[in-house]
Image (cartoon, rainbow, N blue to C red):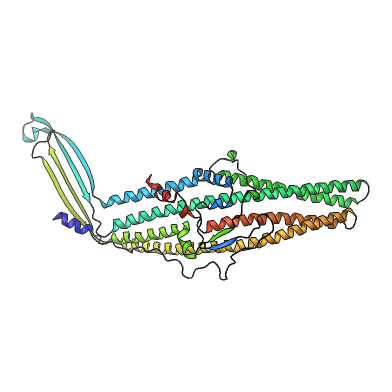
Amino acid sequence: MIVPAVALFAAGCTLGPDFTPPQPPMNAGYSAQPLPQTTQSANIAGGEPQHLVDGMDIPGLWWVLFRSPALDALIKRALAGNPTVEVAQANLKQARELALAGRGALYPSVGIGLNEQGQQFSGASFGQPGLSAIFAITTASVNVSYVPDIWGGIHRQIESLNAQTEFQRFELEATYLTLTSNIVAAAVQEASLRAQIAATQDIISVESQELEGLQRQFAVGAIANTSLLAQTATLAQVQAQLPPLEKQLAQTRNQLTALLGQLPNQEPAETFDLDSLHLPDALPVSLPSKVVEQRPDIRAAEAQLHEASANIGVAVANEFPQINLTGSLGVESAGVPFAANSEIWSVTAGLTQPIFQGGKLQHQERAAEAAFDAAAAQYRNVVVTAFQNVADVLRALESDASSVNAQAIADKAAADSLEAARRQFMIGATTYISLLNAEQVYQQTHIALVQALATRYADTAALFQALGGGWWNREDAGEVADSGKK
């Protein structure tokens, strides 16, 4: 009669809510007004138009679109050596092992026991003080215990552990995405700083030549000392801009080194400049319904919501009776080998029903429901933030292209104006103040153009990050999901 009863209990219900993944937001979009499908162009390197393609998929190795072998090599080494990746991988493995361990609660627990007891017998208690004997009792048994999951509490606990594993999986994907995006951003920053340093050095060279010319004119009395002093001050101001740029470049190189998981004295050989980076001409714009599937942070938030839902079922099941079945089968003998007819066995069935615990179980259920509400709100917040990220980047790309175009026009105009001012100054057709103003305008516009180009590259990389980074197309995506098995 015991076995059929156990089977009946084991086939019981599963209490608590069944989790349903949230639906994508209705009528979602990235802008209240239609976005242009093609950005402006400028007649300079890096000023090519970019085309936004609705529904275009993202390659798993999205950074290869920048066509930089140095960048590819750097990211490959970073994924293999960055400690944050190792932390996320270990966390995923731990979560998977805990989920596998949790499944063990569905099965009976079996153990063996061996007990040896020695005792000296004295006949004094029977009035025969001279009688004494030593004997031993040996007991060997197999013990079985089983808790039928009649209310589904164990299944809900396993469901919760599996959701934790899913959370850690997407935390690992988020780590990959953040790391690769940071490397691309640092490479672009390095390229920008090198271009700004080169431009500043060119300006210093030109200003130095101007100063030498003025010194010759001053020596023959052709100009006043005020012009010479003004040019000396201008050159010093430009020279003062160089050390901060060099400091930023050194710090950016240190950042790249750290992203590789290496120490500052192990700086990578790869270097970056804007000419070595290609601006992708076709950019993906994922459908809003796809963003919730692609963003690792949204998928991680969904896993946390799933975990909170399962925990409600655990709390509810704890309020119902729990049955514990135990049994043992063994032998007991005063010596070894065991004598015939020394078998012993026992079977116990116990039921525990919580009656009064000061409201503990009820409040635990309410706490689990509140945790679910918090996870649901957090999920919605992550979705809103994700759509904001995409919208911000799409708007930035449009603005970046317009900025590059405007800065390119301004840079050419400033260069032409400076050349004209120099010719006029050499023949005495204009004052030195006019020449100085032209020089300062050119300095500002040239540096601004370099910064605008770098911003365009950086925001292009930010779009791939905002859309999820294409992890679903990466060859090792399945290995990430199964990495806890190793």
Q: Which quadrant of the structure image shows residue 440?
A: bottom right
**Whole-percent x and y of residue 45?**
67, 54
Q: Give the number of marks.
A: 0
Quarter-wise, where is residue 74 in the image?
top right
For this rendering, which residue is in front, 421 or 170? Answer: 421
Q: Is residue 197 above or below residue 387?
A: above
Does 252 appear above or below 391? above
- Expressed as whole percent of the image width and height from the top left, the position of residue 446 reads 73, 55
**Residue 181 visible in the picture:** no
Kindly identify the residue that appears in the image at 17 percent across and 48 percent down: 327
User: Is residue 47 left or right of 292 when viewed as pictured?
Assistant: right
Query: Looking at the image, is 121 positioned above or below residue 271?
Result: above
Residue at the right extreme of this rendering:
221
Res 32 → quadrant: bottom right
Quarter of the image where the N terminus is located: bottom left
Q: Nearer the viewer, residue 356 or 414?
A: 414
- What residue appears at the point 56 percent right and 57 percent down from the top-left corner? 462
> Taking the image as drawn, is residue 264 in sight?
yes
Q: Is residue 3 left or right of residue 178?
A: left
> In the current view of this chain or complex, which residue is farthest to the top?
130
Looking at the image, residue 478 sits to the left or right of residue 201; the answer is: left
Whole-percent x, y for residue 436 in the image: 82, 55
Q: Position of residue 238 (x, y in %)?
A: 76, 50
Q: Quadrant of the C terminus?
A: top left
